[in-house]
Image (cartoon, rainbow, N blue to C red):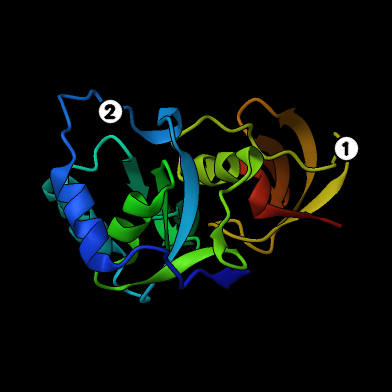
Amino acid sequence: MEEVASIPKTETELEQDINNENVNDIELPVGSKAPGEWYVVHTYSGYENKIKIDLSKRIESMNMQNKIFDILIPEAQEVEYKGGKRKVVSRRVFPGYVIVNMIMDEDSWYVVRHTPGVTGFVGSGNKPVPLQDYEIEKILQQMGLVESKPKIIDIDVGENVRVKTGPFANFEGVVRELLPDRGKIRVNISMFGRETPVELDYEQIDKL
C-alpha cells in the first residue's frame, strides 16, 4: 500500500471552492451507518487524538459535514489479569492511523490531507482505496461498536487444559461445560486434593 501525494487542483482553488459551498442543516449519521466509505489515513504516531480533534474542527469550519462524516481511532478492548484481577483495557489496533468515513472528492481529500499531522491516505498508486465491508466490520467489532460473536475454540467436554492467566494460572483441569454464547468454559481444577469448578474465558486456556 502506498500513500497518495498528488492532487489536481491548487490549494488556493480548493480553499475557494470549499468556502463558497453552501451547506444547509444536515443530520449526520455516525459509526457504521455513515453514508460514505471508510478510508485509512496515515498520521504521526502518538498524535491520533489531536488529529481527530483538529480534523473535526476543520470539517466544521470549512463546511464539510456533507462529505466527511466520522473519524475513528481503531482501538480494541483486551482483557488483562493483574494480581488475580480481571481488567478490560483499550489498545491501539493500528498506531499511526485513523479511519475516516467520507465521500471522496478533491475537496474532502484536501480537508483531510492538509490537516496538521496527516501524512497521507493509504491507497494504490495515486488513488485512496476504501476499506472493504468485511475490513471495517472487523475494526468496528474490535472497538465494540458493533456486536461480534464470542470467540470459540476447538475443544470438547472431558479434554484436559492448562490455565494461562488469572488467579489459576498454570493449574491444569478438565473441561466440564462449554458456554459458547458467553465465550466461556467451565473447568474442574484440582486444588489441594479436591476438584474446584471455575469459569474461564476461552483466551485463558490452552489444550494439553
The residue identified by callout 2 is: 28
Which mark is in front, 1 or 2? 2
The residue identified by callout 1 is: 158
Residue at coordinates 54% horizontally, 57% vertically from top-left? Answer: 166
Please, what secondary structure does the residue beneath circle 1 have? loop
State the quadrant of the N terminus: bottom right
Q: Residues within 10 Å of mark 1 (few under 14, many from 20)?
A: few
Task: Identify residue type, mark 1.
Answer: Gly
Please, what secondary structure does the residue beneath circle 2 have? loop
Residue 115 is situated, as x and y percent measured from the top left of the image, at 26, 65
**Residue 26 image-quadrant placement:** top left
**Residue 8 image-quadrant placement:** bottom left
Residue at coordinates 85% horizontally, 42% vertically from top-left? Answer: 154
Residue 38 is situated, as x and y percent measured from the top left of the image, at 48, 45
Q: Residues within 10 Å of mark 2 (few under 14, many from 20)?
A: some
Indicate which disc residue 37 carries: none
Q: Is residue 198 above or below residue 62?
A: above
Residue 169 is situated, as x and y percent measured from the top left of the image, at 62, 61
Residue at coordinates 74% horizontally, 30% vertically from top-left? Answer: 178
Task: Identify residue type, mark 2.
Answer: Leu
Q: Is residue 159 above or below residue 119?
A: above
